[in-house]
Image (cartoon, coloured by chain):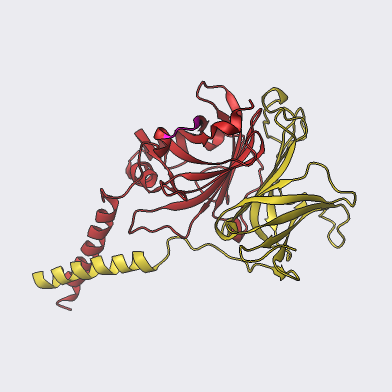
Chain colours: A yellow, B red
Amino acid sequence: MIKTFIVGIILGAFGAGALAWYVPAVDLHRERSLISVKPNGGNIEEFRIDLPRDRIMVGLPNSNAGIPAMLHWPGEDLLGDMQAEIFKIRDRNNTVIGVGSRLASAAEASGAFIEWSLHFPARGTMYVEMEVTPSADGYRNGILVSGTRDFSTLTGSVREQFISDVGGDADIQGRIQLEAALVGPLGAEQ
Amino acid sequence: MKYAIPLTLGFMCGAMLLALGLYYNPFVGQPTITPLAMSDDRIIQLTFSAVPSDAILYTDQGETIITPHPDRVAELWEPAIADTRVLVTMLQNSTGNTAGLGIKMLSESEATDVIRGEAIANSIWHIYLPGLGTMLVDQSENYWSYIRDVVIPAHWNSADNWRGTFHHITTNGPGSLGTARVTGGSGLLAGMTSESVEALTAIGYSAVSGPVSMDGSLTIAIPEESTAQQ
């Protein structure tokens, strides 16, 4: 009887250990990455933010128009004219795959800026610095300053565009489209 | 049948012994002293309240014990972001004055390994410091010490809370010394690369509503040339 009990202890310890070793404690949901290959190297991935449904937060200086409505945004004396927004990020199929923050300031003493951090839980994060002045055709271009995990070895650019006319869905009043053109260390972006 | 009962009891005892061994394993856990203490660079210490209701905004999937804040903030219920939390908070400097704004996005990591005492999360801080510029801090964090020393004792407590003193570094990578990677974005910090560590100091935790009294701190090494123009 005692021997059986001891055998049970050993089996229990090894069984629980094997369970803890082989069964993942965290199993993240993954969506298939919708990437197009660019001619002559690199790849393109499109991200979308549908407005207003993907807005999590809008913090505006000296404004009561923040989102959500009960948001207590610090005054202009603390953060100047800095505007902070947080969104859910969708892929080309309109499936939410991450969250992103956009910070912008035109009057910051150390220099105006517009930048994104795009966080995809199963893939990594992109940190993108945009040009303050948009191009004549309505785009704003930026560069990937830094990436983590899947994006850590990539370089490239990101193009931001606001689309006001999104047909097909009455709930969507506008869309921010981000097009990332990225290339790995062995190639060269064209 | 004669052997079934002792075998089952033994099996349960074995599993319990392993669980206790993992829980009380003295060889795992996070350090309490920052590896940046010996850095020659200028050190910026940024502190914040880690109590979600003190933040400007906190949101998650909406089914945790922590209530998203403020009311009617969008919840992160979609499958791909259901293990992600977003915290927006003011950051104070070492003198207690407002230093800037920080946005933290934290996701549970598949690198979590119970056997090794690693409850890993991947997180980033998107930070704006007026007069200095912007930066991104990316790190992996190990919350095992926090779960073992604060969260589980709070659930065991008959009053569903924990009170005590807890202080640990949570950052454990990707830097070789267990530091986070800092990338400057704009202003005086543009082009900067540096290191950082985040620490958590807890005094009170409720198993019903989450952190009650808890502060976080970010220690960031800023190379002198980045702020020389200031």
Q: Which residues are magenta?
A: B39-43
| Residue B17 x/y as whole percent | 22, 58
Q: Nearer the viewer, residue A103 or A91?
A: A103
Above/below status of B29 relative to B128? below
Residue that extends furthest to the left in the rendered view of this protein: A2
Residue depicted at x 39% and y 43%: B146
Q: Main secondary structure of the magenta part?
A: loop
| Residue A152 x/y as whole percent | 57, 56
Residue A32 is a magenta residue: no
Above/below status of B49 relative to B29? above
The answer to whether A52 appears left or right of B121 in the picture is right
Residue B83 can be seen in this image: yes
Screen quadrant of the N terminus of chain B: bottom left
| Residue B143 x/y as whole percent | 41, 47
Q: Nearer the viewer, residue A105 or A9?
A: A105
The answer to whether B7 appears left or right of B72 in the picture is left
Above/below status of A137 relative to B39? below
